[in-house]
Amino acid sequence: MKVFVVSDTHDRLSTLEKFLDTLKSVRGPAYLVHLGDVVSPFTLKLIAESLPEGFGLKVVLGNNDADKVLLSRISDVVDQPEELELCGLKVLAFHGFKSPELTEKMATWAARDGHYDIVMYGHTHRFRLERLRSSHLLNPGALSGYLAERATYAVIECVARRVSVIDLSTGAELLGSTLPKKLPRENVKGVG
């Protein structure tokens, strides 16, 4: 199974459609986690309707996702923060808190705590992949490419135990890291 992680699409359909085209070749069970700022219901509808068969979808709301009721009618949409189990790893997923600086502090604090195997977040429009103690800190960057040096997303490969940040334009891995081998934990909402 693969888990794709995106954030900050901001209704930019050109980059979103390019990303969705990359998913067409994915076979088997897969999952997409969107870390907020989808923005409009029509964008989430495009995502939900374009995912290949066998894909799950979870959306953590961001600060620019205004129509929560309509968004939640389209897909599995939750307020932040959200605990997930991905690839047998305990994950904390959120969009962000107020400023990019505060968001980075909160994410770093949560990762250093060691309670989660992966802390994933968005909001800053800056991709990041870093190991802090026993946790990984992951920001897939902005899929829109707005206020960023490039449009990016992340992939977690469950079998290979690898996480990567990918440049949407080139398909090149910008950052990569090996994940620990762990057994699934209890009392965490599972998605794969």
Image (cartoon, rainbow, N blue to C red):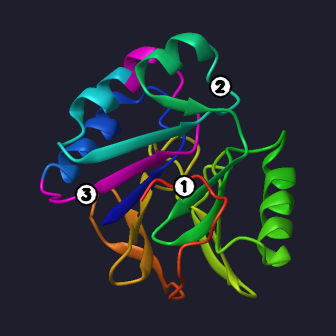
Residue at screen point 39% across, 49% down:
32
The outermost residue toward the front is: 186
- Of discs 1 and 3, which sits in the foreground? 3
Callout 3 touching callout 2 (CB < 8 Å): no
* Mark sitting earlier along the chain (1/3): 3
| 60 or 14, nearer to the observer | 60
* Badge 2 amino acid: Asn
Residue topped by disc 3: 29
Q: Which mark is residue 45?
A: none
Q: Is residue 167 left or right of residue 121?
A: left
Residue 108 image position (x, y, % from top left): 80, 68
Q: Is residue 76 above or below residue 152?
A: above
Q: Is residue 187 left or right of residue 1?
A: right
Looking at the rendered structure, the secondary structure element under dot 2 is loop
Q: Which residue is mark 1?
A: 141
Identify which residue, 34 or 189, lies in the foreground: 189
- Residues rendered magenta in the picture: 25-44
Using the numbered discs, state the Cα–Cα distance from disc 1 to disc 3 in whole angstroms: 24 Å
Label 3 and label 2: CA atoms lie apart by 30 Å
Q: Secondary structure at mark 1?
A: loop
SS for callout 3? loop
* Picture mark count: 3
